[in-house]
Amino acid sequence: MTQMTPPLANPDTANSSAPEPPFVSLHTAVVLLTALVIGLVIGGLTALADAPIAVAVLAGLTGAGPSVPALRSLIDRHR
């Protein structure tokens, strides 16, 4: 009978120890994207109310900025 040899290990996977952690966690991405949507909605509604564009941008930033800490505490982290 012929003897079977074990397959050779893939050199790409043999040297990698652990997967690299993500640059941004899922919790952070959800919080920042939700704050972005809040800022865009507030800025868009302000622009639709015939306010100058600079005022609409400032309103959007004012809405998005303080919503980050509030969303951070409201959205639960699951590990």
Image (spheres, rainbow, N blue to C red):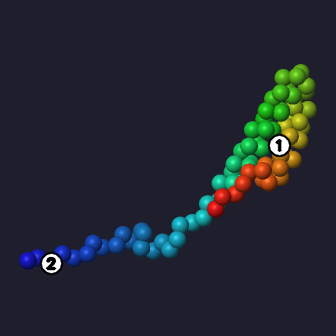
Residue 31 against residue 5 in the figure, above or below = above
Judged left or right of residue 42, residue 4 is left
Question: Residue at point 72% right, 54% down?
Answer: 76
Residue of label 2? 3
Q: Which circle's residue, 2 or 1, is located before the other in the chain?
A: 2
Quarter containing the N terminus: bottom left
Judged left or right of residue 26, residue 18 is left
Residue 24 visible: no
Gap in angstroms between the C-alphas marked 2 and 1 = 67 Å
Which residue is nearer to you in this view: 12 or 59?
59
Question: Residue at point 84% right, 37% down?
Answer: 60
Judged left or right of residue 66, residue 29 is left
Q: Mark 2, residues whose alpha carbon is within 10 Å: few (<14), some, or many (≥20)?
A: few
Residue 6 place in picture, x, y as percent: 26, 75
SS for callout 1:
helix
Residue 66 place in picture, x, y as percent: 87, 47
Residue 49 visible: yes
Q: What number of labels is visible?
A: 2
Q: Identity of the amino acid at label 1? A: Ala
Residue 19 against residue 62 in the figure, above or below = below
Residue 72 against residue 61 in the figure, above or below = below
Residue 61 place in picture, x, y as percent: 85, 41
Question: Residue at point 77% right, 44% down?
Answer: 35
Residue of label 1? 64
SS for callout 2:
loop
Question: Residue at point 52% right, 71% down?
Answer: 18
Q: Identity of the amino acid at label 2? A: Gln
